[in-house]
Image (tube, helix red, strand yellow):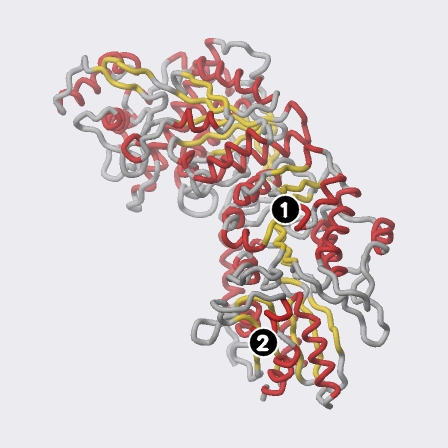
């Protein structure tokens, strides 16, 4: 007998060891730091002392970032040091403006993470040596922006995504804090061109989000200059989407950036999103740049080696890739101006470079004034800032009182009547949550509320708790994700659209869950409900073209990040599912068929299987037959097929139980118990793609087959194996065509041997 621990247990042990080696992955981290809070609305101009302090902090952070990348070079690795150094100066000012309550920030160009970590360490949130020693090694400081004390909860991933997420975060803060809400989003001059970024700008303006974008226009992308790769001026495009453009010469001009931020803050108060755009300076002689940055000797030598005259007029970008890394900075400057010697440093590195020589360059030296400013700042009485993790999945969220559930019972359809869509229960449930918790529920709609049945909830919510985005489904998911992180309070954020749109258009919103790290170190889905309506082949009599046949596989793919995935079997089960997901913190997916289904009832008592106050359970037994050694296991809407098949088999003298799976994950040990209870076999039934042995069994069928590995238990699976050809009929005809019906289920049970 094999007594070695299972792979799952070994993985959990590795997880514990990794967390134990972390300094910051905790439920709560308390930081004691020197104060650095500036009121952008009250302070009209920064003092000379303020400007000197910011310059000193920039130098300290840049040196730290360079040392961290040098440490990384020892294992022959590189990083995006060029963009990270570019990020540091304006990010430090942002960190002085936010309070992580009504004012917050995020970073769209999240590959600049070492600049972010270096800034946090310079302000005292992180241990300096820890950043140097563990950047891109271990758990604390990964290679993209991730949540750490003092930082942003919106962990960065794909370019462009945070444009819309920041808008959602700003909308949630507006609902909580009114005109005091403000979100700042740092972004690059490449990611803005992504489709979801453009839609995000549009959504921010349409919904009047109090958000300010700061574009780091350094002119360099991964494989060349921005002009070579894109060649598009962002300003007219973004302005046409409704974003106010605020031009400023440079993000490194601390005083000038302050004035731009003051203007942006005033606009945000009025619900006008803005983009701060550093235009740079044109026709600047190279010699003047050397004098400006105190690097005349370095610049003269570099220009001479490449045969470039010092009186050559150039464009000095409003932010410089590899800022303060003088050799690389000059190569970037020459590249964007098309001069000999130019090189891109999107992937900046320290491999083969002399760290001490680099740190000795003039732009990384602290003057006496800088040192004095830092000393004064460090001598200030420290402030204590507590960073708390988001609640654990399944923690209490929006609970519906018993008396409210009792009133809702009367609105639910009774068994024995006309078949009805589970959407009827959806309408009652969401309205119930909205009327019970109107300050804590948010609904995002894409012109489908009457079909997805969130329309009654919308009537119970104030305007700042509901958002209309026409047909921008992908952006709606990002908006929902950002909104979920706007405040730590319990809330229900629902985005409802057709399941086919989630599969084909809006899936990026799920992908964002994969890189949203909680402070505990776990990547977790956010406190959002993605409501998939019209799932499976229940699409009415539209031409069958696949539609939402992969909805179960979609949810299975994100199951590690979910609290629960719900697949209610009828209208009453739908209300139970939605009340349950509202009561539990975490990421949820709920799949609702479009077409009519029977309201399921106990065949003996005639009472419904689910009442408004029923607790949600992972499975429900629909039929119990004495002596049953086989069972039908239906997923969601196919429950009545399993019940009918069990009835027919019983009438023929064959005892076969029937169960419905209400959602996933199943309780621990659930499948083991079913395998033991039914040694002669199980038949699974689902309205989704299950594949074939040749192409791989997937869907719920694949889950069961995988769990049965190594067991001698017969299995059969009903579902859609080939979606390429089908009639344009109602769902019952389609199910019959695909063999999702009682006669096929009966035959499948009889085939189990």
Q: Dividing the image into 4 quarters, which one contains the C terminus?
A: bottom right
Residue in view at x 46 percent, y 76 percent:
693
Give how far across and how far down residue 440 sits, in percent: 72, 39
Q: Secondary structure at mark 1?
A: loop
Q: Position of residue 615 (x, y in %)?
A: 77, 60
Determine the residue positioned at 59% across, 62% down. 536
**Residue at (77% x, 60% y) in the render:** 572
Q: Quadrant of residue 485?
A: top right
Residue 294 on image: x %, y % = 28, 15
- The answer to whether the residues at label 2 and label 1 have Cβ atoms under 8 Å apart is no
* Residue 61 visible to an observer of this rendering: no
Q: CA distance from mark 2 to mark 1?
A: 31 Å
Residue count near mark 1 (Cα–Cα under 10 Å), binned few <14, some 14–19, many ≥20: some
Asked if 225 appears above or below 570 in the picture, the reply is above
The circle on residue 448 is 1
Q: Which of pointers 2 and 1 lies earlier in the amino acid sequence?
A: 1
> Which residue in the protein does label 2 denote?
739
């Amino acid at each position: 007998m094999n007594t070695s621990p299972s792979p799952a247990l070994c993985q959990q042990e590795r997880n514990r060891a990794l967390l134990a080696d972390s300094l910051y992955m905790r439920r709560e981290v308390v930081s004691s730091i020197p104060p650095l809070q500036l009121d952008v609305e009250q302070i009209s101009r920064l003092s000379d002392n303020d400007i000197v302090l910011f310059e000193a902090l920039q130098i300290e952070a840049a040196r730290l970032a360079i040392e961290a990348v040098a440490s990384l070079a020892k294992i022959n690795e590189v990083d995006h040091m060029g963009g990270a150094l570019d990020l540091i100066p304006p990010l430090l000012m942002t960190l002085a403006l936010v309070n992580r309550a009504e004012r917050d920030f995020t970073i769209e160009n999240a590959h600049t993470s070492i600049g972010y970590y270096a800034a946090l360490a310079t302000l005292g949130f992180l241990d300096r040596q820890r950043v140097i020693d563990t950047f891109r090694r271990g758990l604390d400081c990964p290679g993209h922006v991730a949540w750490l004390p003092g930082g942003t909860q919106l962990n960065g991933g794909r370019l462009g995504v945070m444009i819309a997420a920041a808008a959602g975060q700003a909308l949630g803060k507006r609902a909580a804090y009114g005109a005091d809400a403000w979100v700042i989003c740092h972004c690059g001059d490449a990611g803005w061109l992504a489709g979801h970024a453009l839609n995000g700008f549009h959504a921010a303006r349409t919904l009047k989000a109090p958000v300010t974008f700061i574009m780091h226009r350094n002119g360099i992308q991964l494989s060349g200059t921005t002009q070579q790769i894109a060649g598009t001026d962002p300003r007219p495009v973004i302005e046409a989407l409704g974003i106010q453009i605020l031009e400023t010469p440079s993000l490194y001009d601390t005083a000038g950036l302050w004035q731009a931020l003051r203007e942006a803050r005033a606009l945000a108060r009025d619900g006008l999103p803005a983009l701060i755009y550093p235009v740079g300076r044109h026709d600047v002689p190279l010699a003047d740049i050397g004098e400006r940055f105190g690097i005349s000797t370095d610049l003269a030598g570099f220009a001479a080696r490449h045969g470039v005259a010092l009186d050559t007029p150039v464009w000095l970008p409003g932010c410089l890739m590899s800022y303060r890394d003088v050799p690389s900075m000059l190569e970037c400057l020459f590249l964007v101006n098309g001069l000999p010697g130019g090189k891109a440093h999107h992937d900046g590195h320290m491999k083969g470079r002399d760290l001490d020589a680099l740190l000795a360059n003039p732009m990384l030296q602290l003057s006496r004034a800088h040192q004095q400013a830092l000393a004064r700042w460090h001598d200030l009485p420290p402030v204590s800032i507590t960073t708390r993790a988001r609640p654990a999945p399944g923690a209490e969220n929006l609970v519906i009182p018993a008396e409210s559930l009792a009133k809702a019972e009367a609105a639910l359809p009774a068994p024995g009547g006309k078949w009805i869509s589970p959407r009827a229960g959806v309408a009652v449930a969401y309205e119930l949550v909205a009327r019970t918790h109107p300050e804590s529920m948010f609904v995002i709609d894409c012109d489908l509320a009457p079909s997805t049945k969130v329309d009654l909830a919308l009537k119970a919510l104030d305007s700042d708790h509901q958002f209309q985005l026409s047909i921008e489904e992908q952006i709606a998911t990002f908006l929902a994700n950002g909104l979920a992180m706007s405040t730590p309070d319990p809330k229900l954020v629902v985005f409802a659209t057709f399941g086919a749109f989630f599969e084909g258009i809006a899936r990026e919103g799920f992908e964002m869950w994969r890189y949203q790290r909680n402070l505990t170190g776990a990547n977790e889905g956010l406190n959002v409900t993605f409501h998939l309506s019209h799932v499976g082949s229940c699409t009415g009599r539209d031409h069958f073209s696949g539609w939402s046949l992969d909805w179960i596989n979609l949810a299975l793919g994100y199951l590690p990040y979910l609290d629960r995935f719900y697949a209610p079997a009828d209208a009453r089960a739908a209300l139970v599912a939605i009340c349950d997901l509202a009561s539990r913190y975490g990421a949820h997916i709920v799949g609702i068929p479009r077409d009519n289904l029977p309201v399921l009832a106990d065949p003996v008592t005639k009472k419904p299987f689910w009442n408004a106050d029923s607790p949600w359970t992972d499975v429900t037994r629909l039929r119990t037959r004495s002596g049953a050694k086989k069972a039908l296991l239906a997923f969601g809407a196919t429950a009545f097929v399993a019940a009918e098949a069990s009835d027919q088999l019983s009438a023929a003298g064959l005892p076969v139980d029937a169960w419905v799976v209400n959602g996933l994950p199943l309780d621990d040990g659930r499948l083991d118990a079913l395998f033991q209870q039914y040694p002669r076999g199980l038949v699974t039934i689902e309205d989704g793609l299950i594949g074939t042995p040749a192409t791989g069994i997937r869907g719920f069928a694949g889950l069961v087959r995988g769990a049965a590995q190594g067991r001698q238990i017969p299995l059969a699976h009903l579902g859609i194996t080939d979606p390429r050809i089908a009639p344009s009929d109602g769902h019952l005809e389609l199910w019959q065509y695909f063999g999702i019906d009682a006669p096929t289920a009966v035959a499948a049970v009889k085939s189990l041997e």
